[in-house]
Amino acid sequence: MTEPLRIGLAGLGTVGAGVARLLAANADLIAARAGREVRVVAVSARDRAKDRGVDLAGLAWEEDPVALAGRADVDLLVEAMGGESGPAKAATEAALARGAHVVTANKALLAHHGAALAAAAERAGAELRFEAAVAGGIPCVKALGEGLAGNRVARVMGVLNGTCNYILTRMEAEGLAYADVLADAQRLGYAEADPSFDVGGTDAAHKLALLAALAFGTRVDFDGVMTEGIDKLSLADIAHAAELGFRIKLLGVARMQGEALEQRMRPCLVPAASPFGKLEGVTNMVVVEGDAVGRIVMEGPGAGGGPTASAIVADVIDIARGAHSPAFGVPAALLRAAPRAESGAPAAYYIRLALADRPGALGRVAAALGAVGVSIHRMVQSADEAEGGEATVLIVTHETTRERLDSALAVVAASDVSMGAPVAIRIEPV
Ligand code: NAP
Ligand code: HSE
């Protein structure tokens, strides 16, 4: 066997401790597959006294992750600290600058600085890998960059935040508000250090921006992702969607509209019987549609120490074997700066209206929708909520644009039959 691959591990939280545990538990198997021993030599975290549940005896401790990245005995930095800048960025840059490889789980860092870091890795002849940054344990980065590399991708979609899917599943099953379930997701190690990144959709948008760059060869454009989280979703809409045969998911979609890139990460209704509709708990799903292969569906745990360590160690093994590939599938200089699509592709929409329960109210709604060419496919008025002068009306439209729908709903909201702000959620054709 050749020399061991020496790892510097920055961060010993859910992910970092998971990596240390997996490298120790499967050391023989990993060495056999890597063709050499993979050995952690030094670590960094903030609190030296904290019990990590892993044996750190014999490992060097660095207070400063940048010093860890600069150690001559570190061949590869595993960055498991998090944060789009600060020590994660500084340590990654320091490692790459001296030609050490970097494996990171940090989607925030890559969503903001991916192209620059990829270029830095190429200049130094080092590898930058990030399988763990997207969809936890699902090997979707490798699938897009290697297994599907011969395809022109038409669309990539994903449920990419385990915390949100866990919360939505329990909201639907147990009738709990999102805030009641979030604490459990945090306790289980799924959530980000700042969980507003999860429930606000930012974390999933980071991941979608990375998938889009891999799928379409475009520069990572996180600011171009139209993002909305699950924090404003009501239990009523989750229940009504179920009555209509749908489930609500925080779903990401990226596609090219000609030369323009469309990226959306928003709550959507999907058919309950579809693969996305069946996803439960912390599970993620990535769907890729390629011109040669057709549709590929990948499903697996999207967060937690074990699944994330699985993805990190796979990247480490690849590097130990001597594999070389550009971080985003093509050299950083060839990533195209695509213009942003001005709006999403047309779709059907779910609408919930609170209306005065009096003659002519529905007629006003139908007229407002009809005036801008929005056609009604299904409509339901809940009988038991029609008491007290207010009725809940659910509408499923035919395919339309968000702009048309919004203009019609503005007319409804301003009318004297409206008794609450209208809700509209896209029904994604999956
Ligand atoms: P975490 O549990 O909060 O762990 C963060 C670790 O980084 C802690 O050990 C912390 O030290 C250390 N750290 C923070 N700032 C530091 C600094 N300035 N110097 C040295 N060490 C520092 O977070 P995590 O859940 O493991 O997530 C880590 C990364 O993985 C993030 O980028 C996250 O987005 C990503 N990720 C997480 C998951 C998941 O399921 N949790 C899945 C995929 C990707 P102390 O322990 O001493 O505070
Ligand atoms: N907080 C993230 C999630 C971790 O819940 O999906 C995995 O990236």
Image (cartoon, helix red, strand yellow):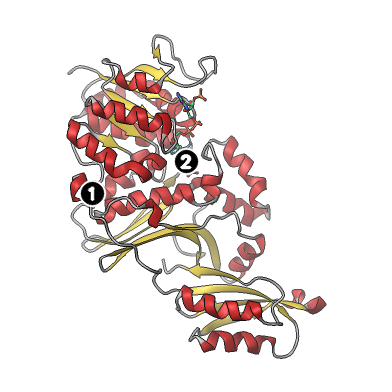
Relative to the observer, which residue lies in front, 373 or 134? Answer: 373
CB within 8 Å, label 1 to label 2? no
Name which of mark 1 and mark 2 comes first in the sequence: 1
Residue 191 percent coordinates (x, y): 53, 40
Residue 272 percent coordinates (x, y): 52, 64
Please indicate, yes or no, whether residue 319 appears anywhere in the rendered image.
yes
Q: Helix or strand or loop: what does disc 1 sit on?
A: helix
Residue 12 percent coordinates (x, y): 46, 24
Identity of the residue drawn at 56% across and 45% down: 196
The answer to whether the beta carbon of the residue marked 2 is less than 8 Å from any atom of ligand 1 is yes
Q: Residues within 10 Å of mark 1 (few under 14, many from 20)?
A: few
Quadrant of the rendering where the N terminus is positioned: top left
Q: Name the residue under label 2.
A: 303
Identity of the residue drawn at 22% across and 60% down: 152
Residue 430 is tagged as: none
Q: For marks 1 and 2, give the CA distance.
A: 23 Å
Say which amino acid is labelled 1.
Answer: Gly
Relative to the observer, which residue lies in front, 377 or 355? Answer: 355
Q: In this view, does 14 lie to the left or right of 149?
A: right
Q: Is residue 370 left or right of residue 178?
A: left
Please indicate, yes or no, whether residue 138 appears anywhere in the rendered image.
no
Relative to the observer, which residue lies in front, 405 or 310? Answer: 405
Q: Mark 1 points at which residue?
A: 147
Q: In this view, does 423 lie to the left or right of 312?
A: right
Relative to the observer, which residue lies in front, 185 or 254? Answer: 254
Q: Residue furthest top?
A: 58
Q: Helix or strand or loop: what does disc 2 sit on?
A: loop
